[in-house]
Image: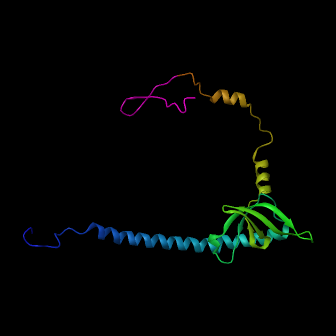
Amino acid sequence: MFLKEVKEAGIPDLDFLDSISLNKRYAYRQSLLQDLGKCFHSEYLGQLRQYEKKLRNSKHLEREDVVLISSDNTKGLDWSLGKVIELFTSPDGNIRLVKLKTKNGEVLRPVLRLYPLEVTEHERAMCQKYDKPENFTCDETSELERYSIDKTESYESTSGDGRKLKQVERLAL
């Protein structure tokens, strides 16, 4: 073995074996990503468009609503989210243009290019209003006293080895 130049010593190259399994794993993850994108595009965006048509007939957009901003040159998966800042009405009294805040700044878009998400700010406020029972009373001070921790009490905590742990002082306050 040492005197003759032998290319293989009988041990497989681990880099070669790992690259095969990694390539298979990468291909599998790419196919999962494509399948998820197809499902999202066909199911969720389709339902959102139907919801938007129903919504357009029933009411208009309001400030603070979150919408998907469609564009012709990108796929539905890549549409950006925006929050309605300002509504512009046309001379006939309908809302035609909306000022939106996106992650890249503020943009103006026509209402026809917007797809409101299911929950608007008004609906969210209505849900919060009805989440709390009307006859619910709570004495906040008694609750706080019952669960408060007395900071003057000192306690010693130990690690798994039995060493004493010190309380960390943050910003020396």
Q: Is residue 60 left or right of residue 116?
A: right
Of 1 and 45, nearer the camera is 1
Which quadrant: the C terminus? Answer: top right
Quadrant of the image occupied by residue 44: bottom right
Q: Residue furthest left?
A: 3
Q: Residue furthest right?
A: 92
Which quadrant: the N terminus? Answer: bottom left
The question of residue 156 being in magenta is answered with yes
Residue name at image x 46 percent, y 25 percent: 156
Residue name at image x 52 percent, y 30 percent: 169
Q: Residue furthest bottom?
A: 72
- Estimate the x, y position of residue 15 in percent, counting from the top left: 30, 67
Of 30 and 99, nearer the camera is 99
- Estimate the x, y position of residue 160 in percent, counting from the top left: 38, 34
Q: Is residue 121 left or right of residue 21?
A: right
Of 135 and 77, nearer the camera is 77
Please name the predominant secondary structure of the magenta segment in the image: loop
Please say if 166 is above or below 99: above
Q: Which residues are magenta?
A: 154-173
Quadrant of the image occupied by residue 101: bottom right
- Estimate the x, y position of residue 111 in percent, counting from the top left: 79, 70
The question of residue 158 being in magenta is answered with yes
Quadrant of the image occupied by residue 73: bottom right
Residue name at image x 59 percent, y 74 percent: 38
